[in-house]
Amino acid sequence: MANIELQGLVKRYGKMDVVHGIDLAIADGEFVVFVGPSGCGKSTTLRMIAGLEDISGGTLRIGGEVVNEREPKQRNIAMVFQNYAIYPHMSVRQNIGFGLYTSKISKADKNERIDETAKVLGLTEYLSRRPAALSGGQRQRVAIGRAMVRNPSAFLFDEPLSNLDAQLRAQMRIEIKRLHQKLGTTIVYVTHDQIEAMTMADRIVVMRDGHILQAGTPMDIYENPLDVFTAKFIGSPSMNLVPGTFTDDSVRIGPDGAHLIGVRPHDLLVGELRGTGFNLTGAVTAVEPLGSETLVHFDAAGTSVIATAPAKLLPAVGSSISAHAKPGSLYLFDAKTEKALGRQ
């Protein structure tokens, strides 16, 4: 296993910087997830760690050693790709063991490693099959197995679940998390899906435009976002942001306010207006019944807002509703800089 350190890491294409001197220390055995929209630099950063992209500036250390100029095979890392990258003409056993065929270990030891890896991943009964006879989730496990069998210092995952359907994604999230708990190997994982990031990571790194905006535990980033982008990106449904002005005694809603007032949909509850806290009224624009609860979209002074209602409450589109958030559940941001100012 190994720690990974990024110090002033830069990636440049021609005269254009796409990763802007980022700093990050990943502890030995930590599960770190890079998350952000397409084009934010997360996959490029992962590929620099893997050695698949040249480093334009800064220093990359793996296990305390500078690896900027080392070839991928010299870094003792294993990468799992979005498209599985397994060979259709080979059996599961051959695919898992592919990376061992040029190694100097004995055939018996190779087979032992393959059998152990297949057992951990629940693939033992499929070892003689070819990928065409497997489900998407099983193929992804084969790709993970091919990385595992080499006993790498770190695993790098580049959006490995994006080709799977929703049910399989949820299942594979749990399987990868359990695998990390069992192996304790350092994992760096890239995704654009904030639910994957929240449910899997020891620590989340939020990226935008080649910069790291915030790094912290999932709950720290959820509860204490440092800016509007992070506040909206982390959490599902996304945080409501209403323009207005906040003072010690009251909240005034309006388009020319000095602040953006944030409230998460699960803290904004449909019901009667109250004297304390945060109150909004508006016309219903859409209703999403989810079984356990109902998400109600409504227009509040020209701003689209989502509130939560009991499961059986289904207000009609066009009807007027009120919603309330308790004191302490509001997030305050500067309207110009979009930086966080605190909780209220």
Image (cartoon, rainbow, N blue to C red):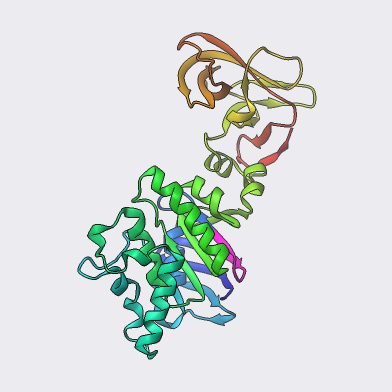
Residue drawn at point x = 66 percent, y = 12 percent = 272
The total number of labels drawn is 0
Q: Main secondary structure of the magenta part?
A: strand
The quarter holding residue 257 reads top right
Residue ranking furthest to the top: 319
Q: In the depicted view, which residue is nearer to us: 95 or 14?
A: 95
Identify the magenta region: 22-32
Residue ranking furthest to the front: 125
Q: Is residue 130 left or right of residue 329?
A: left
- The N terminus: image quadrant: bottom right
The quarter holding residue 183 reads bottom right
Residue drawn at point x = 39 percent, y = 75 percent = 114
- The C terminus: image quadrant: top right
At which x and y percent is residue 18? 43, 60
The quarter holding residue 92 reads bottom left
At which x and y percent is residue 192? 44, 49
